[in-house]
């Protein structure tokens, strides 16, 4: 079940805890993709807060928002990059995307299988997608004071297994949001300390979200037309009868 776009916008832009989450996730994403010059970058779900750094230098940036969630213009004060799309049918050419961020998209989708098939379709050769989902064992997934307390949380093994079933090759994983999901001033002030400490703790215990980066896996064809053609080469003179007796030389 998707949350309403208004609620998501209010959390990330109007609450201190939301801005902490925005900063923690964005820093991890930028560290993975520091340079997208000339590339097409997109986000699905509510990925706008993570896409702003890519507006500078990228060839194109698209903020895809699913119909059940709703859409709003993004970014504020600039030309609109938001597009309302069907959850599993995007108006994008096959293989058109170089980078894709999925945030509040997979864990809230009603048909994850169809969504992953659509992501595989639009991702180009060598393209990469980054899935950000609530950690099943984390505190953030157990409290509904943030958007990560809704939808279906994942363990790292569950997420990677599902992605591999849909022909994605996991490259690396990371975690974020070690700050307790509380609006109390003490936790808000100490958020940087929690993030630093959390990186030294097991993901299953401390992390609020899991991030898995994948690439599109395309299998090479098992048979080649050329290979079949040369398997039984033709003789140039095949079918032409050889003359009987000794060859004849000289003038006729």
Image (spheres, rainbow, N blue to C red):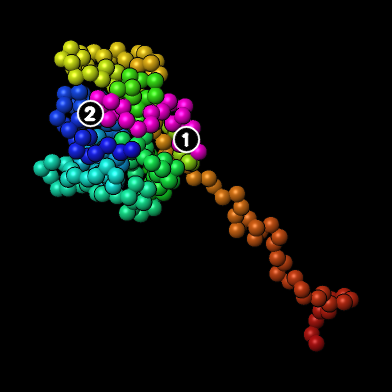
- Local packing at callout 1 (Cα closer than 10 Å; few below 14, some 14-19, many 20+) is some
Q: Residue at x 87, y 77 (%)?
A: 244
Secondary structure, mark 1, is helix
Gap between marks 2 and 1 measured at Cα: 26 Å
Where in the figure is residue 166, as x and y percent of width and height?
48, 41
Residue 106 is covered by the magenta coloring: no
The answer to whether residue 185 is left or right of residue 203 is left
Residue 159 is covered by the magenta coloring: yes
Residue 91's image quarter? bottom left
Q: Residue at x 39, y 20 (%)?
A: 137
Secondary structure, mark 2, is helix
Where the N terminus falls, by quadrant? top left
- Local packing at callout 2 (Cα closer than 10 Å; few below 14, some 14-19, many 20+) is some
* Nearer the observer, 210 or 173: 210
Residue 51's image quarter? top left
Q: Earlier in the sequence, mark 2 or mark 1?
A: 2
> What residue occupies the far right of the structure in this picture?
245
Q: Which residue is mark 2?
A: 22
**Where does the magenta region start and end?**
144-165
Q: Residue at x 33, y 19 (%)?
A: 139
Where in the figure is residue 69, as x and y percent of width and height?
27, 42
Question: For the image shown, how many numbered marks are present on the structure?
Answer: 2
> What residue occupies the far left of the structure in this picture?
77
Where in the figure is residue 237, as x and y percent of width and height?
73, 71
Q: Is residue 74 visible?
A: yes
* Nearer the observer, 70 or 221: 70
Verify CB contact (< 8 Å) between mark 2 and mark 1.
no
Q: Which residue is mark 1?
A: 162
Where the C terminus falls, by quadrant? bottom right
């Amino acid at each position: 079940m998707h949350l309403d776009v208004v609620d998501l916008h209010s959390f990330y832009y109007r609450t201190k805890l939301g801005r902490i989450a925005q900063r923690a996730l964005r820093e991890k994403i930028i560290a993975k993709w520091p340079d997208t010059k000339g590339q097409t970058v997109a986000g699905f779900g509510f990925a706008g807060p993570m896409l702003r750094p890519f507006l500078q230098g990228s060839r194109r940036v698209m903020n895809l928002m699913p119909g059940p969630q709703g859409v709003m213009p993004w970014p504020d004060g600039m030309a609109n990059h938001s597009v309302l799309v069907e959850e599993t049918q995007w108006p994008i050419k096959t293989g058109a995307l170089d980078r894709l961020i999925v945030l509040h998209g997979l864990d809230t989708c009603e048909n994850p299988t169809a969504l992953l098939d659509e992501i595989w379709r639009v991702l180009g050769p060598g393209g990469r997608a980054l899935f950000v989902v609530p950690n099943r064992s984390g505190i953030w997934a157990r409290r509904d004071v943030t958007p990560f307390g809704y939808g279906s949380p994942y363990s790292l093994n569950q997420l990677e297994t599902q992605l591999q079933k849909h022909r994605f090759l996991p490259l690396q994983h990371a975690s974020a949001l070690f700050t307790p999901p509380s609006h109390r001033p003490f936790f808000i002030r100490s958020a940087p300390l929690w993030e630093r400490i959390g990186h030294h703790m097991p993901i299953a215990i401390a992390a609020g979200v899991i991030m898995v980066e994948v690439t599109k896996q395309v299998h090479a064809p098992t048979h080649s037309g050329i290979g079949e053609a040369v398997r039984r080469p033709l003789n140039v003179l095949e079918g032409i009868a050889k003359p009987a007796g000794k060859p004849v030389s000289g003038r006729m």
